[in-house]
Image: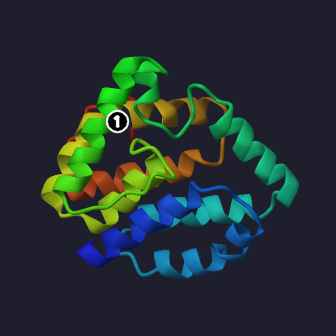
Amino acid sequence: MNREQMKTVFLCTSYLLSYPDDAWANSLDDCLEAIRTVQNEAIIDKITAFIHEIQTIPARQRMEQYVETFDFGKKTNLYVTYMNTGEQRERGMELLQLKQRYKAAGFDTTEQELPDYLPLMLEFAAYAEQHHVVPLFETYADNISEIRKQLAANRSPYTAIFDAIFLALEELGVKLIAKGSV
């Protein structure tokens, strides 16, 4: 995949991991169209399968499932440093270091999300240079893999998004030593 296709994958997966409200649901066809431009059939298949499955779930159920999975699930929340330190003080230092990594790469974050929020990290991957992205995701590959493993154990449709993320990271050159990754 070239840089533009990689950007498409990271932006699409970031979006698909956001809250599935009506506007989100109305944009799924745009995401399908964008992902079909990627030259990686496995990624296309994972994202397409997810979108087709999620489109069969009624809106209210889809939103409840998302909240239950990512907002209330301690082992499946989208804050990748959470499983290292939880709400402990050490996490604050790790979050600050993450913010500094983003800044060093020329990526500005807002105060709306913590820097370890996976969709934000995927946006970073879409825009930052590879030499900034690879070490960041190598640092957190095990944590992301653990979320994926929990999703798979719960038979969550979101597992396919994590599979697509790992396929893209592998293609980008991230060394995945994580167990349970694709």
Residue at 59% across / 36% down in the picture?
151
Asked where in the image residue 84 lies, by quadrant, the reply is: top left
Return the residue nearer the eye: 107 or 131: 107
Q: Quadrant of the N terminus?
A: bottom left
Q: Quadrant of the C terminus?
A: top left
The answer to whether one can see residue 155 in this image is no
What amino acid is found at the position of numbered circle 1 in the picture? Leu
Residue at 25% across / 35% down in the picture?
139
Residue 55 x/y as whole percent: 75, 65
Return the residue nearer the eye: 136 or 166: 136
Q: Secondary structure at mark 1?
A: helix
Query: Against 135, is 41 above or below?
Result: below
Residue at 60% across / 56% down in the picture?
18
| Mark 1 neighbour density, 10 Å: few (under 14) some (14–19) many (20 or more) | some
- Is 119 positioned to the left or the right of 27 in the image? left
Asked where in the image residue 135 lies, by quadrant, the reply is: top left
Give the residue pinned by disc 1.
95
Residue at 43% across / 35% down in the picture?
80
Callout count: 1
Residue 78 x/y as whole percent: 52, 40
Query: Against 175, is 74 above or below?
Result: above
Residue that sits furthest to the front in the current view: 111
The answer to whether one can see residue 63 in this image is yes
Query: Against 43, is 23 above or below?
Result: below
Return the residue nearer the eye: 108 or 69: 108
